[in-house]
Image (cartoon, helix red, strand yellow):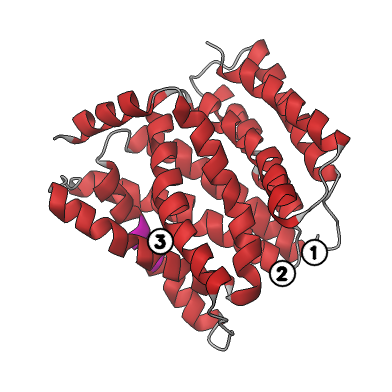
Amino acid sequence: MTARTAAGAADGGLGTAAPALFVVLWATGFVVARLAMPHAPPLGFLALRYAATLLALAPLILVARAPWPDARTAAHLAVSGLLIHAAYLAGVWVAVATGMSAGVAALIVNLQPVLTAIWLALGAERIGARRWTGLALGFCGVAMVVAQRAGTEGLATTSVALAVGALLAITAGTLYQRRHAPAFDLRTGAFVQYAASLSATAPLALLLERDARWDWGAPLAFALGWSVLALSIGGVFLMFVLIRRGSATRVASLFYLVPPVTALQAWLLFGEPFGLLAALGMALVALGVALVVRR
């Protein structure tokens, strides 16, 4: 099966459920960060996550004899992987570890739809008044959700810079991949990306977190397993499929749904506040995304 054939089969099988499933899975990333953060250093955990993901992908690739990308495509995938995985996740996790609340980090990172739209407006893709309106409504809704529970005690210069860096990284990475590597086998392509991410993250973890404490137990083991299977494989594969299927603006707008869904998950799992303001914000986000994705 070729890369394009595999992509088409995946697209057809996922159908209209792919965007909703992607949002739910991606939103669990902040919940997993909260669960794992007290038990492991951020860079060390991410390096372990990338290594475990490579071990999980290897047998899938070998059994299916999945095709490997050519050297040029592999190089582009390595660049996009460093941006989408290594830089984005490191920025978010270290920002939260240094004191920024997960809510504020989510708000900063989920400026991505606006940043993507501005970048594309400077290029060839037409955004249109309806989509601009949807982007604005979505951002206002995200702000309402986060405002109810986000503190400002963690807004140090370092943590803000890390979160903004993560925003720039995932925006640039998704646009770069869409342009330079639009078609590839998901299994081998992801392997290349995670190998590049591991090669960048592991040395930093060894250098900066040599004396960090690891508290192995059920919470950390669950966080690692979920991060590998549900996020690094499931969530990222869905994102790649969505990038292929739609415009960058439509795909980016889905990230507006992540903070509200994260807030709902945190309310269910940890009892974090989720009141009327958050509910109104979720409704506004849904309206904004609907305006953006409607053809």
Which residue lies under the disc numbered 3?
A: 197
Q: Residues within 10 Å of mark 1 (few under 14, many from 20)?
A: few
Q: Is residue 36 magenta?
A: no
Q: Kindly identify which numbered label has been placed on residue 156.
A: 1
Most common secondary structure along the magenta stretch? helix
Is 78 located above or below residue 90 in the figure?
above
- Check whether the beta carbons of the residues at disc 2 and disc 3 lie within 8 A of each other: no
Does dot 1 land on a helix, a strand or a loop?
loop
Q: Quadrant of residue 24?
A: top right
Which residue shows up at 44% across the image and 38% down it? Answer: 239
Earlier-in-chain disc, 3 versus 1: 1
Is 127 located above or below residue 80 in the figure?
above
- Check whether the beta carbons of the residues at disc 3 and disc 1 lie within 8 A of each other: no
Q: Can the viewer see residue 149 in this picture? A: yes
Chain part drawn in magenta: 194-198
Tag 1: amino acid: Ala
- Check whether the beta carbons of the residues at disc 2 and disc 1 lie within 8 A of each other: yes
